[in-house]
Structure formats: structure tokens, C-alpha cells
Amino acid sequence: MKIMAISHPCVTDVNQQFYAELEALGHTVQLIVPSNFRTTYSADAVEVSRWPDFAGTIEQRKVGLSRSIPLHYYQSNLRPSIAGFRPDVLFVEEEPYSASAWQAFYASRDIPMKRVVYSAQNILKQYPLPFRWMEQYVLARTDLAAVVSRDVGAVLRKKNYSGGLLPFPLGVDTGQFKPMREEGRQLRQELNIENRFVVGYVGRFVEEKGIRYLLEAVEKLAGQPVCFLFVGKGELQEEIRSAQTRYPEHIRILDSVKHNDVHRWMNTMDILALPSLTMPNWKEQFGRVIVEAMACGVPVLGSDSGEIPVLIRETGGGWVVPERNAEELAGMIRSLMEHPEERDRRAEIGLAAVSSSYSKKGLAKAFEQALVEGRPGELSGKAAR
């Protein structure tokens, strides 16, 4: 198959691995990505990089509203590229209500191909015009929706989408995210936490991720041989630094770690914590760090927000506590400090589950089967093995 993907995530090389796996299956892939996309935490445009194993063309196009995932749009006509490549499959790795998804679908009008759109939106929302019209236009012409979870598929059905649903969880590169115990020990020594129980957090420092409840847990566990390692950055960074001033032995902050190095720091952790909160307009859509941590042999302690309990239950690689409950969170951490055999058991189970069901190779094979063989996978939240 000839596959064209329009994808803002692919400005970052690691997100091209899925397409490299499609190439390994014998397909030809061309990417169209923004040349000037900006993230929330970067004033400068993200420099487009290439995944070493991806050989296809990466066509960079300038976009308007470059800081917005749903609003960014390509400032030049996509139709000449689509018509010139004549793909068998157009995969728009954007939400169906987004400006770039509508733009890609409209540009491909009347050209025979299968059209695939991506979605992680797990809350039913009615968008204002013209986005509601744009979403309806895209969904009416979609042959297959790659959905992160069951809830996402249910939302699309409520919006009268009648096409196929392909389970498309956020996969993990098991060649990069893997147990690296010796390097983990060395990094713990660098941070002077080699004799402490390390509770890790990786992601944005924002309210909806439950950061404040982690800080409450720090306070409740003060005096215990435990250290909380915060990897990321965000608007609550100063609150974490303030807590570090009060509890210098219990908090470490790494705010400049690149994604390509996250796996190294995950290997310093005894557990990873993801105490996300359900907000009026948001709940955890998947939790990529869950499968990344498990791939490193690190079990996960998560809240019961969104897809977190589903993912932890299906992998068996962790535990769930009620969200917004620092007492329960701290109590479970204390219990896990005292029972290393339970941590090791869950770590082993989670590692095996992620290796078999959440690898990028498995996602690529499931994508191929759905489009070539016409066999979308069961909507179980797991990629095909």
C-alpha cells in the first residue's frame, strides 16, 4: 500500500516509528508535517527530526496557529501533494474536529482512497460552528477511525459515525523503553537517592495530572526513606520547587529531560505514579507513560481517572487508588515500600503485557490487517499481537 499520513506528532522523530514499522511490512509511506509547530512550553518552533529507521519522504509545510493542536492549519494547498502521491490510504493523525483534519479530507475529495482519522477524545462534546460542521464532514467520509480506547469509539458512535473502529492505543518503543537496571543505579547515585524508595512522575506539571496530591503525599511521607522524582515541566513547577525547599531530601526535579532520555530516568524509579484528576472537560485519555514505565519494568500506581484503571487492569502491571485522595495515595506508597515482592510481581506482569500487546510493531500489523484484510481488531483497548 501507499500510505500518506498528515501528522503534527511526527515533527518528533519517535512518533515516526509506527510508520517505520509499516515500511518494514512492505508499505510506502509519505508524511506531511508542520515545519513551524510550537508546543506549550517552547517559544521556538519544534525542529523536525527523522526517526533513524524511517526512510519515507517527510514533507514540511508551514502552518498557521502553530501553537494549537486542534486549530493549526496548513497555509498551502494539500491537494497537489495528495493527488501527486495518489495514496491507497490517507491517515490523518488528527482529531476529526480539527482544522487540519477537515483540510486534509477536503483536499482529498474525489480521489479514490481509504481515509483514516485518529481520535483520543473520550468525552462527548458539541463543538461550536464551524468545527461541528467540519467534524461531521470528516466523519461522514471516514472509512476507519483509529481510536485510543473504548470510550473514544463510543463517543464517535454517539456522533453518528458508522465506519470501522480500530483499537489504536498509544504504543511504546520496546527497543528504547526497556529495563536498564545498571544505568538506573548509576543515575540514582548522581541524584544521591540510591538508598531511597523512588516514586517517579513523568509528564506535564499541571493541575489535572494530580500534582498537588503527589505533593500532599510527600508531606505525609516526610521522614520515610522515599524520594519523589518529578520529570517534566509546566505551570505548577514553582509549587513543586517550593515543596522541595521544605522537603529537600524527598523531592528531585528534572525539567529539561528530552523524550529520547525519559526511559533512562524511568529506570531509576521503583514505581511510577499517575494520580490524574477527572475535570469538567477532561479525563485521562490513555496515559502513555503507563506503558512506557511498564516496558522499563516499573509498575504503576494510578488514579481511577479515565482510562488509567482500564489500562492497569488489562496489563496487570500496577495498582489503582481513588483520585483526589492523598491519604490513600500515600498509604499505598507506604505499603509498596514494605512489600518489594509485590512490586516485582506486578513489574514482571506489566512488562510481559506491554511487550506483547502495546508495541509499535503490533500497532502497525493491526493497522495493516484492518486496511488490507478488512479485519479491524476487537475494540478491547489492545493492539493486535
Image (spheres, helix red, strand yellow):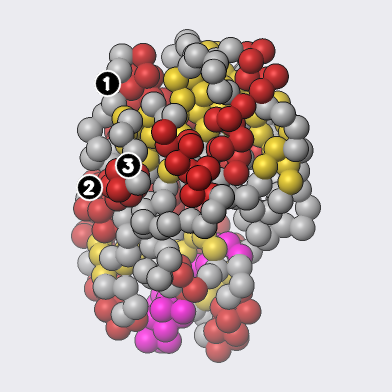
Q: Position of residue 99 (x, y in %)?
A: 60, 44
Q: Which residues are magenta?
A: 212-233
CA separation in Å, label 2 and label 3: 28 Å
- For the residue pair 120 and 336, the one nearer the viewer reads as 120
At label 1, the amino acid type is: Arg
Above or below — where is 290 with respect to 86? below
At label 2, the amino acid type is: Glu
Q: Earlier in the sequence, mark 3 or mark 1?
A: 3
Q: Which residue is mark 3?
A: 160
At label 3, the amino acid type is: Asn
Above or below — where is 235 with respect to 178? below
Q: Which residue is mark 1?
A: 375
Q: Earlier in the sequence, mark 2 or mark 3?
A: 3
CA separation in Å, label 3 and label 1: 21 Å
CA separation in Å, label 1 and label 2: 22 Å
Q: Position of residue 189 (x, y in %)?
A: 54, 62
Check contact, mark 1 vs mark 2: CB within 8 A: no
Q: Which residue is mark 2?
A: 314
Disc number at residue 19?
none
Residue at image coords 43%, 66%:
281
- Label 3 SS: loop
Residue 223 part of the magenta-drawn span:
yes
Above or below — where is 314 with respect to 240? above
- Label 1 SS: loop
Residue at image coords 44%, 20%:
114
Discs 1/2, front: 1
